């Protein structure tokens, strides 16, 4: 799917440009570019985006110019790197929601191409994964910016997994004690959770098979830590009383089967009044459907 020859050339230019530069972790700098590119490959992004990710810090941190990249890789890759270089110098220092929204708008307007933001999100994700090597004050500033700006952007771009991981990494930095306590609580309930998933999946699978629905897949997963924590705070309830700690998912082949499956679920377990949402008929504002 990807143009591996072009990516190899982008890697070589990046490794050459960053030669001798180290991350605070002690790793070669280019390993960061490779990690960012790898995150984007996992997100099924295109060759242009992955190449730009390999080169995303080159203009900022070396003698290589946007024109060099344009000559070597064309205008599209060059424009993406240019956009990333421009937003690299912006810093956000506020916890006001309105300020955060203005800042997100500013980012989007400078970026122009949505792929700039997507690369920036992957860059931030890798920086958050390796944040322990930064001094504490800087950790807090970056974690706050991640929570206020980048996690909501990831949500808006429909990148649920990236959003959840960014939130949990920021949680670990900003409320370390609460985070550690919640990790312990979630772990302690793990077996119970797995039993619950089994207890629900069994009868549902039987019911669906009886109804002639085939090829379905039922999975349950714990929600991310930050979303559990936020609910505890919002509802002023302890962990034990947060009921939607598990997300339960049934994947079927088409929309018709989706509603049919829902019918069987509602026949087995009564829905909670006022808590049911149909995101097929009414997609979320980020177009999640
Ligand atoms: Mn970077």
Image (spheres, rainbow, N blue to C red):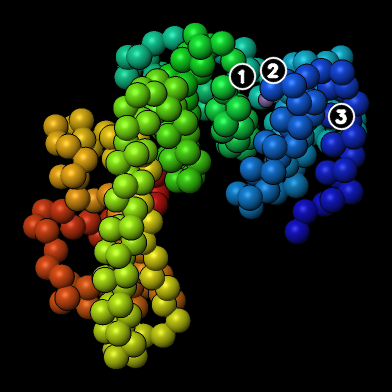
Query: Residue 106 or 189: which is nearer the viewer?
Result: 189
Task: Provide residue 225's location: percent of width, then percent of height.
Answer: 36, 39
The residue at the far left in this view is: 273
SS at circle 2 = loop
Residue 242, x across and y down, in percent: 19, 45
Identified at 20% across, 30% down, the residue is: 233
Q: Quadrant of residue 168?
A: top left
Q: Is 260 positioned to the left or the right of 117 in the image?
A: left
Q: Quadrant of residue 201?
A: bottom left
Numbered badge on residue 15 = 3
Would you place residue 152 above or below residue 213 in this image? above
Q: CA distance from mark 3 to mark 2?
A: 17 Å
One can see residue 120 in this view? no
* Residue hosting label 2: 24
- Residue 62 is situated, as x and y percent measured from the top left of the image, at 83, 16
Q: Which residue is mark 1?
A: 133
């Amino acid at each position: 799917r990807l143009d591996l020859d072009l990516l190899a050339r982008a890697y070589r230019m990046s490794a050459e440009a960053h030669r001798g530069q180290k991350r605070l972790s002690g790793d070669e700098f280019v390993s960061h570019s490779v990690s960012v590119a790898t995150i984007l490959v996992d997100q099924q992004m295109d060759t242009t985006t992955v190449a730009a990710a390999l080169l995303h810090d080159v203009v900022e941190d070396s003698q290589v110019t946007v024109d060099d990249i344009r000559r070597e890789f064309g205008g599209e890759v060059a424009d993406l790197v240019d956009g990333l270089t421009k937003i690299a110098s912006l810093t956000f220092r506020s916890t006001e929601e309105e300020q955060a929204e203005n800042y997100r708008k500013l980012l989007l307007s400078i970026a122009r191409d949505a792929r700039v933001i997507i690369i920036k999100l992957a860059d931030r994700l890798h920086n958050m994964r390796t944040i322990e090597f930064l001094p504490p004050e800087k950790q807090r500033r970056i974690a706050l910016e991640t929570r206020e700006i980048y996690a909501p952007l990831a949500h808006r771009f429909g990148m649920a997994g990236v959003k959840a991981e960014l939130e949990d990494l920021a949680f670990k930095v900003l409320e370390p004690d609460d985070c550690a306590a919640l990790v312990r609580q979630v772990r302690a309930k793990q077996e119970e959770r797995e039993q619950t998933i089994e207890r629900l999946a069994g009868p549902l699978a039987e019911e669906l098979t009886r109804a002639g629905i085939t090829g379905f897949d039922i999975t349950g997963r714990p929600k991310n830590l930050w979303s559990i924590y936020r609910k505890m705070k919002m509802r002023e309830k302890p962990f034990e009383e947060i009921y939607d700690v598990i997300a339960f998912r049934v994947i079927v082949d088409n929309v018709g089967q989706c509603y049919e499956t829902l019918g069987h679920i509602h026949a087995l377990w009564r829905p909670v009044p006022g808590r049911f949402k149909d995101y097929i008929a009414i997609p979320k504002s980020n177009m999640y459907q």
